[in-house]
């Protein structure tokens, strides 16, 4: 009789241990899934922060150009702040800020040449080129917003 009771109790304990093991397995699986979702969310938010910084640097650069604060130092800061993030952006955004940098460089060169030029025809041509570039820069905030908009969404 005692031996039969022992077998019954060992079977019950074995079943309980199996049940507890299954429960712990389910809890572990839920924990892993939640950790993965949390890590994925954190990655998305961190990427957003970095992309937003690039977007703001582009906007600040365009604003500085339009306000007449373009300088060699500003060009260097822009190159450092934006062009070092190639791994975050697609080729269309890379082409956009390459074009911004190129046009700003031409604008800076035109302004420098206008100061030193004595020939009025050349000065007029340089002023026209400068005016065209500034008009081009006026259109760029909308283009930047359009390019970055799809990358700056925080959706699950």
Image: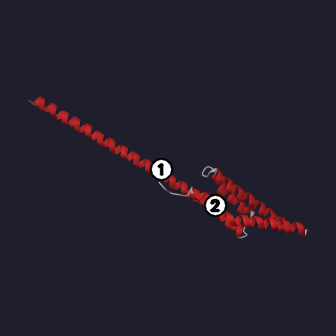
Q: What element carries label 2?
A: helix
Residue drawn at the location 16% of the way across and 35% of the way down = 9
Q: How crowded is mark 2: few (under 14 residues within 10 Å), some or many (20 or more)?
A: some
Residue drawn at the location 73% of the way across and 67% of the way down = 135
Residue drawn at the location 36% of the way across and 46% of the way down = 30
Residue closest to the eye, 127 or 63: 127
Apparent side of residue 125 relative to residue 45 in the rendered image (left or right): right
Give the residue number, with chain letter if any, for mark 2: 144
The answer to whether the residue labelled 1 contacts the one labelled 2, judged by CB atoms less than 8 Å apart, is no
Residue 15 in the image: above or below residue 37: above
| Coordinates of residue 88 in the picture (x, y in percent) | 60, 51
Query: How far apart are labels 1 and 2 at the CA level?
Result: 27 Å
> Which badge, 1 or 2, comes first in the chain's sequence?
1
Q: Residue 28 carries which label?
A: none
Q: How crowded is mark 1: few (under 14 residues within 10 Å), some or many (20 or more)?
A: few
Residue 53 in the image: above or below residue 123: above
| Coordinates of residue 42 in the picture (x, y in percent) | 48, 53
| Coordinates of residue 50 in the picture (x, y in percent) | 57, 56
Q: In which quarter of the image is residue 58?
A: bottom right
In this view, the mark in front (1 or 2): 2
Residue 22 in the image: above or below residue 152: above
| Coordinates of residue 109 in the picture (x, y in percent) | 80, 62
Placement of the N terminus among the 4 image quadrants: top left
Residue closest to the eye, 40 or 150: 150
- The image shows a total of numbered marks equal to 2
Give the residue number, with chain letter if any, for mark 1: 40
Apparent side of residue 20 relative to residue 65 in the rendered image (left or right): left
Apparent side of residue 105 relative to residue 19 in the rendered image (left or right): right
Residue drawn at the location 44% of the way across and 47% of the way down = 36
């Amino acid at each position: 009789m005692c031996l039969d009771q022992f077998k019954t109790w060992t079977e019950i304990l074995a079943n309980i241990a199996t049940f507890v093991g299954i429960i712990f397995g389910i809890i572990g699986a839920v924990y892993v899934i939640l950790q993965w979702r949390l890590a994925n969310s954190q990655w998305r938010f961190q990427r957003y922060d970095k992309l937003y910084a690039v977007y703001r640097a582009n906007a600040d650069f365009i604003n500085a150009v339009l306000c007449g604060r373009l300088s060699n130092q500003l060009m260097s800061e822009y190159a450092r702040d934006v062009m070092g993030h190639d791994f975050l952006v697609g080729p269309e955004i890379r082409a956009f800020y390459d074009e911004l940098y190129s046009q700003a460089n031409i604008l800076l060169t035109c302004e420098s040449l206008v100061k030193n030029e004595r020939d009025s025809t050349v000065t007029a041509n340089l002023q026209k080129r400068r005016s065209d570039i500034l008009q081009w820069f006026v259109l760029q905030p909308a283009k930047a917003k359009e390019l970055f908009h799809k990358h700056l969404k925080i959706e699950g």
